[in-house]
Each structure stands twice: as C-alpha cells, then as structure tokens.
Amino acid sequence: MKLLLAAVFAFAAMSQPLTRINETGYPKLLAANKGKVLLVDFWATWCVPCRKEMPELVKLEAKLKAKGLALVTISADDVENEVQAKEFLAKTGVKSTAYLKAPKDDDAFVRAIDPKWGGELPALILYDKAGRKVKMWKGETPLSELEAAIGKLL
C-alpha cells in the first residue's frame, strides 16, 4: 500500500509543471523568502557538475532547514526538457519549490540576477535573512565552503 501511495504522489508531482520564473519574478521570489537564509541554485539536467552537486545541496538543506535555510532550485533547461528536469528533481529528493527559467529576455534575466554573471552553471547565490546578496559561486563549489558561509548567516 505504501508503495502504491508513493507512486501516486510521484505521478502527481510529475504531472505538475515547474513554476516558471522570469526577470520580473525573481525579485518577488527573493521578497517571499525574507526572514530565511536563502540559497538559490541555478542548474540544468545537461550540466554534469549541477547533477553532481544537487544531492549534496538537498542534504545540506535537510541539515540546516530547522535553523532557517531555504533552498530554491531554478532549472535552466529548455521548456521541452521540463519532464527530465522534474524527474531529476524527484530522483534527488528536492522537496522545495522548483522553478524553470522562462525569461522574456535571457540577457535581462541574467542581468537581473547578477550583472557580473555570464549565465554559467552551476551557479549558487546566497542571500541573508534581509534578502541581501551575500555571495555568488560560479562552477563547482566545495560543500565545506558553502556550509561555512551559510553557517555565518544562520
């Protein structure tokens, strides 16, 4: 019975589209998470370092969620690859709201996130409880460095 229920919930999750986010929605996402230390992960299914990093981020969120950490994932996959993105998120145990990048203008989206960011993946951005950007990591990030930076904000 438990297996059947798990399958039903997994199917229901897979049938729901990822929440779309664009350059005007990103500041709203940040505002909605004020009061928490927020880690935003930009990733894609075709990005090998992203796939490697995601399970570690899920574990980190589970470890620090009670202290006030929130993880938000934003897939840079094309809309046509949304099913693969959702399958990967389910497989890695991501429980938080997941987004799919759907900008009106890709360059404007990247500039809205960080004018110094070229869009490379993976990218992690850490925000303090007031919603201020504390640090951005581009490329693979050592988990110990990430955890230390988060620990200072909790």
Image (cartoon, rainbow, N blue to C red):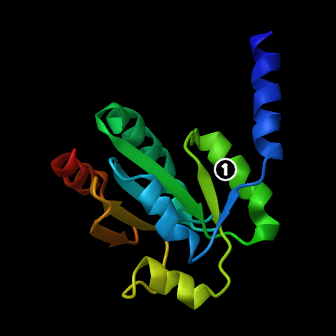
The residue under the point 81% across, 9% down is: 1
Disc 1 designates what residue? 88
Q: Please state, as top left, top right, bottom left or bottom right, where the C terminus lies in the image.
A: top left
Q: Is residue 74 left or right of residue 4?
A: left
> Could you tell me residue 37's position as x and y percent?
32, 50
* Residue 80 relative to residue 89: left or right: right
Q: Quadrant of residue 139?
A: bottom left
**Residue at left 82%, top 68%?**
80
Direction from residue 140 to residue 23 in the image, left or right: right
Q: Nearer the viewer, residue 81 or 114?
A: 114
> Residue flagged by tag 1: what amino acid is it?
Phe
User: Residue 63: x and y, percent?
Assistant: 35, 33
Q: Is residue 49 visible?
A: no
As helix, strand or loop, the secondary structure at mark 1 comes to helix
Q: Check the image and report above or below for 69 versus 67.
A: below
Taking the spot 79% from the left edge, 55% from the top edge, the residue there is 83
Extreme left residue here?
152
Q: Is residue 63 left or right of residue 93?
A: left
Place of residue 79 in the rendered image (x, y in percent of width and height, measured from the top left): 77, 69
128 relative to 122, above or below:
above
Can the viewer see residue 140 in this picture? yes
Give the number of marks: 1
Query: In this picture, is 56 found above or below 136?
Result: above
Q: Position of residue 107 (x, y in %)?
A: 56, 90
